[in-house]
Image (spheres, rainbow, N blue to C red):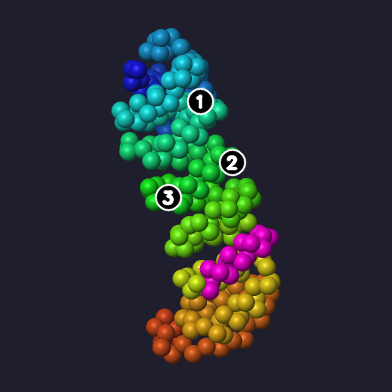
Amino acid sequence: MEKIDLNGLYEDYLKKVVKDNPSKYSDVESLEVDIGHLTDLWENTPELKLNSLSPREFVADLAVKHELYDYAEDCLEAGFEVADVVCFELLKQPDVEEFLARLLVSEIKDAQMLGAVLLREKGGEKVINVFLEAIINPNYNDEVKKIAYEFLCESEPTVVDKILALINDIKESEQGILVEIMAEYKGNKAVFFWLVTMLFRAEDVALYAKLLGKYEDETAIDILKSFATDNDINYVEYVEIRNAVERLGGEFDIEKDFTNDELYAYLKGADITDPEADVQ
């Protein structure tokens, strides 16, 4: 398949528009005002280099011929930016999740990010499954995992059921991020118990104290106070537990000795008061 750079054609089109209308498009701001209209016009205008098809007709024809995915990969391999008109057509394909999932582990430059961004745009149950795999599988890069994490935190409540179905089969060291995702979905006792479990593992007491405070289950008040009383915690952990208890409407009157805590000593020496309670 001929590697046609649609994005390059689009840029050439804009350059010609600016050249032909110097008074109207004398600066970037004036061009930006019309960019939506100009883009729509370009996408629907026949182009000789596309066999007199418009860009939209060109990519629609690729889809009909089942060549759209190959074209997108060809663009990536050639170092072309995949044009928006191609991305829009990709998102219309009923089986695009499978193709985009393959891009997430592709070695082609920029393929992984394109796959992640378009999956986020597509959304839906299939995307939830793909992104859960990305979260727990070490073969996915950190940028992909970040997009997956953000999507799962703002997705549908079915995310919780899917995570609960698999979390017990995952190594303890990798369960934390899944618990953090579930913590975004309030009112589920199973999630609450997982937050308490992570707190008592003492891997990141401050984090899970904070998440319990935000989970809006008052049952956590006594649990947090008991944890602070019975365990040797540092000053940061103490502050987060106190903040969590107070956020949940409880009173926190537990005193601890932080004489040997470096952060506490620093704050006291610098005459800095306790950090503000995080109630966001």
- Residue 271: percent from the left, percent from the top? 45, 85
Of badges 3 and 1, the one in the foreground is: 3
- 2 and 3 marks in contact (CB < 8 Å): no
Identify the magenta region: 186-200
Residue appearing at x 48%, y 47% in the figure: 133
Count of marks placed on residues: 3
Mark number for residue 66? none
Q: Point out the tag, 2 or 3, that comes first from the N-terminus.
A: 2
State the SS at label 2: helix
| Residue drawn at 45 percent across, 38 percent down | 101
- Is 150 in the magenta? no
Q: Which amino acid does label 3 sit on?
A: Asn
Secondary element at image label 3: loop
Label 1: few (<14), some or many (≥20) within 10 Å?
A: some
Marker disc for residue 89: 1
Q: Magenta segment, principal secondary structure?
A: helix
Look at 58% across and 75% down and name the residue there: 243
- Above or below 47: residue 134: below
Q: Nearer the viewer, residue 115 or 179?
A: 179
Q: Quarter of the image containing the N terminus? A: top left
The disc label shown at residue 137, or none: 3
